[in-house]
Image (cartoon, rainbow, N blue to C red):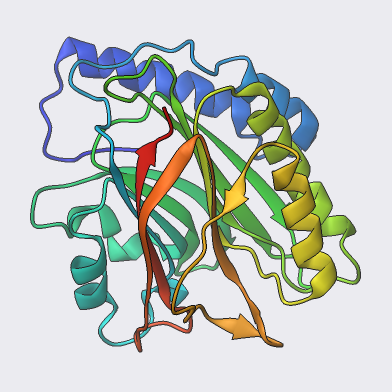
Amino acid sequence: MDKSNQKTDPQRLKLAALLLAVLLVASDPAGTTDLATKARSCSNHLGLLPVAEGQALSPPLEILSWNIQKASNQGWMEDLLALGGDRNLTFIQEAALHAQLGELQPTGPLYQSFAEGYITSSQRTGVMTLSTHAPTMQCNFTRSEPWLGTPKAAAVTEHALIGSEARLLAINLHAVNFTFGIADLNAQLSPLAELLSSHHGPAILAGDFNTWSDSRQRLVDETLSGLGLVPLSFEPDLRTTAFGRPLDHIYVRGLIAEHTEVVPVTSSDHNALRARLSLRM
């Protein structure tokens, strides 16, 4: 999580140290701590870490969620600039680190919250949440595909909001895909559900859910509705589908959609989702 052209003043160094501490608690590269323990560790920090001066988001929030297919197709950079140039929060799935996504915006570098998923000798990909203002904390979660063994990631960030004592919980998810049944998807959702249950403010869960079956969609809907999250609707609904079912979603709690849209693209195998969200008073 960085913003490369900022001055390294003492306050920012303090913020970086706090964020690093949370990342070390919530990320477990050795695999010695289970996801439930990670979720509890992350939950213990919700709402407690300080807010850096001037680093609160101002609603209404402009957001983008898009699987960019590893930035591998011609035109992705131009599309990201056009789609995300005015966004407060951008949820990218299949983000490739080499693409330097946070450095592309004409208004200046963005804060980059990256959770590593699939990696090769030449490429590191995962989910990345870009934000115009510094999050107060970040936790990462991964769940491996049962067949392929490749990890799918979720990045959890918390953000202060102007005009509200509550903070925003933002979750960027790339769901496991190739599975028999829904057990693996349920296991991936469980720690995120625990965080959402522990957090009592507004929340956004956005990403590529790979909801290509009725049972997968039903699991997502039932899990999130029990936590007060509702799906945003899109008209016309031009979301990318598999077996006739949309794969990409944005769920919210404590927020009202002032505008939603799906933007068709040729630079990825997923169309992009955009929304403007205001706080529910």
Residue that sits furthest to the front in the current view: 281
Decide if residue 156 is in sight here: no
Q: Is residue 33 above or below residue 213?
A: above
Front residue of this view, candidates 234 and 103 = 234
**Residue 197 picture location, percent across and down:** 69, 28
User: Which of the 4 quarters of the picture holds residue 162?
Assistant: top left
Left or right of 44 on screen, residue 84: left
**Residue 93 picture location, percent across and down:** 48, 62
For image coordinates 91% across by 68% down, the residue present is: 181
Front residue of this view, candidates 144 and 106 = 106
The quarter of the picture where the N terminus appears is top left
Q: Is residue 194 above or below residue 150?
A: above
For image coordinates 25% across by 76% down, the residue present is: 79
The quarter of the picture where the C terminus appears is top left
Query: How many discs appear?
Result: 0
Left or right of 87 on screen, residue 63: right
Left or right of 211 on screen, residue 153: left
Decide if residue 245 is in sight here: yes
For image coordinates 60% across by 24% down, the residue present is: 199
Q: Is residue 41 above or below residue 248?
A: above
Left or right of 203 on screen, residue 108: left
User: Which of the 4 quarters of the picture holds residue 26?
Assistant: top right
**Residue 109 picture location, percent across and down:** 17, 47
For image coordinates 35% across by 85% down, the residue present is: 73
Q: Is residue 156 above or below residue 167?
A: below
